[in-house]
Image (tube, rainbow, N blue to C red):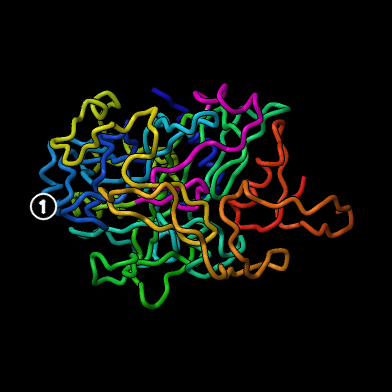
């Protein structure tokens, strides 16, 4: 089992900075990986493969009541029978094009007392998730950046919520860094894929299409809620650490471009997303919110669930022993790999336009998605193109010649990166993943 829990927690603590009390729900390896999504695809197989954590009564037809009938959870806080799920990461072999599932070290969910509604910030207090509540963050079809970093619109905050971290050993030749989309290098200590959930609720609807019943706080992980979503919830922050280094020998020494993709036909990383289906004992969670929020309590300030007397915490070995009650959807060729194609019908789609997501069982499944047509409009900073004519896959860029770009400011000034295996294809792919038309080495 791959783990990098310590480095992950250290990075997260630095990212959060000074904060109110919070607690962490640690979840073991996925309780199941299958084509089920009871939020977006209730009653039918979902479009792509998910890695699912939490209550073992997970089902395509689940309700809050059936979820509370789970006999165990793969997470270490037993009062929490919620389900959390994300797409699954695959390695695409640069030589033969096959796909192999990437191991991960489980899921860590931060429950944070944040925002102007929290009593520590002078607010009236946060509200526990009600029975039947569910939400998601991210868009499985998204394939490029639209908003500049720092944009505070809901669209910009939704993109900021996807920011991850490449965990490295911080040697002279290997320094960790944050990323959007995907990293550009191996992450020796793990690719820490992160996700922040909306925190503001309309107070009425348990679910609306597009998660329209919730919104992000003005500062994403802090700030104010808008008038249409005035109820402050706990702020959820996901971390999944994927073990890239188990594939290092197959691409890094050769200088191949980034070879990892998500199960939702995504080679860009911009389609990273996560779902939450509430399974909490509402009274327990409300007590934890109201009474385990002391920043002067070292355990509560440090995120230890065991420091909150209302939460029941079990050893990791107990969580790991939890088994799903029923697997509803299987695929004859399996999901582990090597596989000739991604599970389901998920031909890779590089954007920059949104991908076409094919239903499970589509036959025949196209080898490629439809080409982007028309113009992809972006909300930009001065250094980015305002619109572009899509050009297909990132590696199909046309050579435009040799140019001098040494002025101040640089002509290609929007983004820069360096690493010890930089190649022209890797440079092109990196810039395409960020939504840029031009790249230079």
Q: Vertically, is 433 above or below 56? A: below
Quarter residue 263 falls in: top left
The residue to which callout 1 is attached is: 65
Q: Name the magenta segment's main secondary structure.
A: loop
Residue closest to the eye, 71 or 76: 71
Is residue 228 found left or right of 187 in the rendered image?
A: left
Is residue 85 found left or right of 375 in the rendered image?
A: left
Q: Is residue 252 magenta?
A: yes
Quarter residue 420 falls in: top right
Considering the numbered disc 1 on the image, is that residue within a helix, a strand or a loop? helix
| Residue in view at x 60 percent, y 62 percent | 150
Image coordinates of residue 364 in percent, x first then y, are 31, 48
Q: Vertically, is 390 above or below 360? A: below
Residue closest to the eye, 387 or 315: 387
Quadrant location, the N terminus: top left
Residue closest to the eye, 352 or 294: 352
Is residue 190 found left or right of 401 in the rendered image?
A: left
Quarter residue 114 falls in: bottom left
Q: Is residue 52 magenta?
A: no
Q: Which residues are magenta?
A: 245-274
Q: Can residue 104 be seen at all in this image of the molecule?
A: no
Q: Vertically, is 256 above or below 199? A: above
């Amino acid at each position: 089992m791959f783990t990098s829990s310590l480095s992950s927690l250290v990075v997260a603590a630095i990212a959060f900075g000074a904060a109110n009390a919070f607690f962490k729900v640690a979840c073991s390896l996925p309780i199941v990986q299958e084509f089920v999504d009871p939020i977006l695809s209730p009653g039918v197989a979902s479009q792509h493969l998910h890695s699912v954590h939490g209550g073992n009564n997970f089902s395509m037809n689940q309700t809050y009541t059936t979820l509370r009938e789970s006999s165990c959870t793969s997470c270490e806080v037993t009062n929490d029978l919620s389900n959390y799920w994300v797409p699954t990461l695959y390695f695409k072999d640069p030589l033969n094009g096959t796909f192999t599932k990437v191991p991960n070290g489980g899921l860590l969910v931060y429950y944070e007392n944040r925002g102007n509604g929290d009593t520590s910030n002078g607010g009236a207090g946060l509200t526990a998730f009600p029975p039947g509540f569910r939400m998601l963050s991210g868009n499985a079809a998204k394939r490029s950046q639209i908003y500049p970093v720092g944009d505070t619109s809901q669209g910009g905050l939704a993109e900021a919520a996807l920011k991850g971290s490449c965990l490295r050993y911080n040697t002279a030749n290997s320094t960790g860094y944050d990323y959007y989309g995907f990293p550009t290098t191996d992450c020796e200590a793990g690719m820490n894929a992160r996700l922040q959930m909306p925190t503001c609720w309309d107070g009425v609807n348990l679910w609306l299409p597009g998660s329209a019943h919730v919104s992000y706080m003005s500062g994403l992980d802090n700030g104010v809620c808008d008038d249409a979503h005035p109820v402050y919830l706990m702020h959820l922050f996901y971390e999944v650490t994927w073990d890239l280094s188990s594939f290092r020998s197959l691409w890094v020494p050769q200088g191949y471009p980034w070879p990892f993709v998500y199960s939702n036909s995504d080679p860009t990383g911009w389609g990273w997303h996560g779902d939450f289906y509430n399974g909490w004992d509402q009274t327990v969670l409300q007590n934890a919110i109201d009474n385990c929020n002391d920043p002067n309590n070292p355990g509560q300030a440090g995120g230890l669930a065991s420091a909150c007397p209302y939460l029941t915490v079990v050893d990791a070995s107990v969580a790991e022993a939890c088994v799903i009650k029923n697997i509803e959807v299987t695929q004859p060729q399996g999901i582990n790999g090597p596989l000739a194609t991604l599970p389901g019908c998920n031909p890779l789609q590089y954007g920059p336009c949104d991908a076409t997501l094919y239903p499970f069982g589509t036959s025949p499944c196209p080898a490629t998605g439809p080409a982007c047509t028309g113009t992809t409009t972006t909300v930009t900073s001065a250094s980015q193109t305002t619109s572009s004519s899509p050009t297909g896959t990132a590696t199909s860029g046309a050579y435009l010649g040799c140019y001098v770009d040494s002025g101040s400011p640089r002509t290609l000034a929007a983004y820069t990166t360096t690493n010890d295996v930089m190649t022209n294809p890797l440079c092109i792919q990196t810039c395409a993943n960020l939504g840029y038309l031009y790249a230079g080495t």
